[in-house]
Image (cartoon, coloured by chain):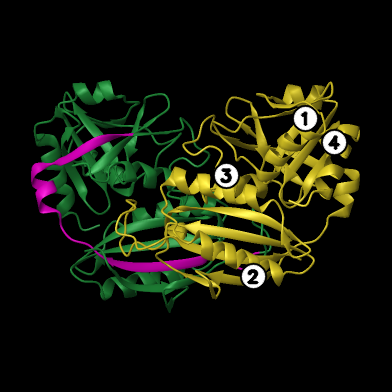
Chain colours: A yellow, B green
Amino acid sequence: MSALLGCWIDGVAGSSVPVDDRGLQYGDGIFETILVRGGKPRFLEAHRARLQRGLVQLGIQFLASDELNAEIARASAMAPPLAILKIIITRGSTQRRGYTPAGFVQARRIVSLWETALETAVAEQGAILRIARLRLPQSSAFPGIKHLNRLENVMAAAEGIGAPAYDSLLLDTGDHLVSGTACNVFVVRSGILLTPPVDRVGVAGVMRGIVLRESTALDIEAREQVLTLDDVARADGMFITNARIGVVQVQRVGEHAFPMNPLATRLAAHIETLDA
Amino acid sequence: MSALLGCWIDGVAGSSVPVDDRGLQYGDGIFETILVRGGKPRFLEAHRARLQRGLVQLGIQFLASDELNAEIARASAMAPPLAILKIIITRGSTQRRGYTPAGFVQARRIVSLWETALETAVAEQGAILRIARLRLPQSSAFPGIKHLNRLENVMAAAEGIGAPAYDSLLLDTGDHLVSGTACNVFVVRSGILLTPPVDRVGVAGVMRGIVLRESTALDIEAREQVLTLDDVARADGMFITNARIGVVQVQRVGEHAFPMNPLATRLAAHIETLDA
């Protein structure tokens, strides 16, 4: 269902990386997960911009943007009608042991193409979410960027194995809502879209950014706001976002059910039609 | 100076891992860094015990302990007089994309042997430390274990590039001392050894554990205590520990200088003579 269709390491077809790659050794790198639809990578500029922010924040010197762009184009052209393009940039191999990122030659780019499928049932009926027991810290050293240190997401997702849930909601140790393990979250209240800020913890999802941008275009008020589970309980509706699923409404969080929200429906349909 | 001497993936000589390994994709795994001296891995039981705690905490089913032990013995036997054995256990390859650790075949073990050298100058004169600007969270979801999500250590170490410092001290957002980027820390005050607890954040270093154990054997009082930079400023002496360096005294932290501490000298010499 989500098999690997192809992989290129620094532009060369292959599916293995050197063991001294700092992505493996320390999670020293970043990634992007891009939906390719009809051979076209969606919202590519937004993905590129976030990748760039991550590179800057981690001080990874990446000199192969042109090569990467060409590889994205080539992989997209050979993709099935719907696919995922995952891009990982690691700091590369340092030829020495130790945390200090010195003595390295160059960043390594890993472009991989994956099968994916439309999830019609969840799109139509809404997603069921559970609440993770794992808590995120209230502030992380690298908020907003999509780095390779994702053990919290893995273990929160692991909690949900066997549960009838599409994803798990993550709270921080101060009981603030952060996101799902693989999505951002919005609640709708009195016609306003609210989503947690990502300046202390969490990932600034590309689709989250598209929702904030496009809501303006649709004359829907949307803003960042610190949220708790009380806000979830009081919401008129709720939806989750990521690059793969777009905007998907939440059917229920634990025992708390939501009706399908017309604003979210309108927003989801609008974003589906966008070309980039 | 710290070149890779050999590497075995699941027992087979080789130096690359599949790109879908969850260690690379998410930092989904753990590691140990073991000093091999005279062909013998030091404190192997303590390393094994911590590895096991990590596997349990991350729910990684690891069925190849016997194979791993044989590989450790084989690599140690071919090591130069002083070497580092780094063991990584990842959750393996899941053949699918996504955080949820389901559908995987088996954990992957990566055994690598690295050059290392005695650092005589730092052992004799003491280490100079700086204080990292990066702050750790006050609590992490995986305290104590040595997992592969080490971007904080990398970026704090990166801060120190060009500075005349051996390592950087990490504080949490509440101004509590945690550790160095690659070592645990102890202060000596009124003849008592104090080290920060690792039940909320930080790594339970093997050499830290050896120091706590052996101080009892030497009739030196040692205990965990929440510490701040005030405690550092008031200390009679300070030392850092890890599996590679053993016990190394701190010469100064920023502008604050320490005399060589006789208790630490005694402890370091005692631990050097231990066989395991």
Label for residue A152? 3
Q: Is residue B107 above or below residue A152?
A: below
Residue A211 percent across, percent down from the top left: 74, 38
Query: Label 4 belongs to which residue?
Result: A264
Q: Which residue is mark 2?
A: A74
The amino acid on which the numbered mark 2 sits, given as a three-letter code, is Arg
Query: Is residue B121 in the magenta section?
Result: yes
SS for callout 3: helix
Relative side of B265 to B179, left or right: left
Viewer-nearest residue: A123 or B28: A123
In this rendered view, identify the residue nearer to me: B109 or A234.
Answer: A234
Residue drawn at 60 percent across, 53 percent down: A32
Mark 2 or mark 4, which has the lower sequence index? 2
Q: Amino acid at mark 3?
A: Glu
Q: Earlier in the sequence, mark 3 or mark 4?
A: 3
Viewer-nearest of discs 3 and 1: 1
Density class for disc 4 (Cα within 10 Å; few <14, some 14-19, many ≥20) is many
Tell me, for residue A187, which label it has, or none: 1
Residue at 77 percent across and 69 percent down: it is A80
Of tags 3 and 4, the one toward the viewer is: 4
Residue A192: give x, y in percent of width and height. 79, 24
The one of B91 and A229 positioned closer to us in this rendering? A229
How far apart, in angstroms, are the residues tagged by discs 1 and 2? 38 Å
Residue A212 found in image quarter: top right
Please indicate whether residue A221 sits to the left or right of residue B49 in the image. right
Q: Is residue A229 left or right of residue B80?
A: right
Q: Which residues are magenta?
A: B104-132
- For residue A117, above or below residue A179: below
Near mark 2 (Cα within 10 A), the count class, few <14, some 14-19 or many ≥20, is few
**Chain identity of mark 3:** A
Of callouts 3 and 2, which one flags the residue occurring earlier in the amino acid sequence? 2
